[in-house]
Image: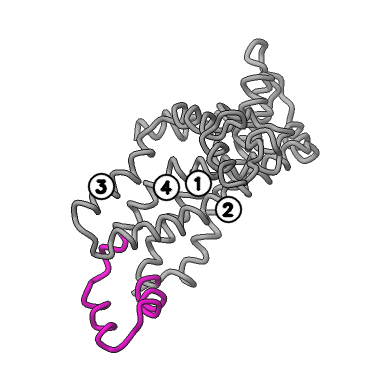
Amino acid sequence: MLLFLVFILGPLIAAFILSFFHYDLLTPPEYAGLENFQALATDPLVLRALGNTFLFSLGSMVTHLVGGLLLALAVNSGINKVLGYLVRSAVFFPFLISWAAVALIWQFVLDPAFGLLNHYLGTIGISAPNWFADPAWALPAIIGIDFWHTIGYTFLIMLAGLQTIPREINEAATVDGASAVQRFFHITLPLMSPTLFFATIVTFIGAFQIFDPIQIITKGGPDDATLSAVMYLYRTGFQAFEIGYASSVALVIFVVIMLVTLVQFIGLRRWVDQT
């Protein structure tokens, strides 16, 4: 309870109060009423940042859910125990690396002049783009880096969900003549729906708060193509020292995450198996 009060509820209340003030950390706060929120409504960068963040979150959810489930199915399919252990370790290992190290690694891999990926693409006749300088490719590149870094967590969630499905159900369906595809869509997916629901919520909440790789690699560029909501909060609060305005941005991020999560819970009964 003490940790909750100090690190979650306290800062949330402080952000709510500061959002009604003009404050630069150096001079006393000045009451501004709803001016910060009115400025948000007409700030084009807020809409750009939220749009980029939603695109990133959607891409992250799709790649993590599909990729994590496919990896979990492969490991859970009865392969050798030693090989399964090695695969689990290899997939989860990047998740243990700090974002700073991951960003530096991928800056080297995707470097347009001497990057490993561009080099090998060139050997097969593919002209690779300048990943972080091209507005069309910068955000997909960040999505790919995030996938490589965090897929291990989603993979373990999916693997745990698969291992809760009784083998007897699949064996009985096999005896009855069900194909692998039929077993997947009529047994595995319905019984995995609670796990998929949990993974969807966790992935969205984490993705909507993306900051580290953007700050380290692109700084929100090029041309604000990778500007995220939290990155914009950082710009306004810790570079422009508009603490009140940054607090209003933080509240918008909180409300968006809360509303999306609420919508997901409202649809819980429709697509999550309750048996």
Q: Is residue 45 above or below residue 151?
A: above
Q: Kindly state the secondary structure of the residue where label 3 is placed.
A: helix
Disc 3 and disc 4: Cα gap in Å? 16 Å
Q: Kindly state the secondary structure of the residue where label 4 is placed.
A: helix
Disc 3 and disc 1: Cα gap in Å? 29 Å
**In the picture provided, is 261 more to the left or to the right than 191?**
right
Q: Count neighbours of disc 2 (C-alpha within 10 A) and say few if under 14, some if 14 to 19, many if 20 or more.
A: some
Looking at the image, tell me whether mark 3 or mark 1 is earlier in sequence order. 3
Residue at the farthest top position: 26
Residue 175 located within the stretch drawn in magenta:
yes
What amino acid type is highlighted by mark number 3?
A: Leu
* Main SS, magenta residues: helix
Residue depth check, mark 1 versus mark 2: number of the one nearer the observer: 2
Q: Which mark is residue 151?
A: 4
Looking at the image, tell me whether mark 1 or mark 2 is earlier in sequence order. 2
Residue at image x 31%, y 61%? Answer: 161
Looking at the image, tell me whether mark 2 or mark 3 is earlier in sequence order. 2
Q: Which mark is residue 221?
A: none
Q: Which residue is mark 1?
A: 205
State the image quarter where residue 17 is shown: top right
Quarter of the C terminus within the rendering: bottom left
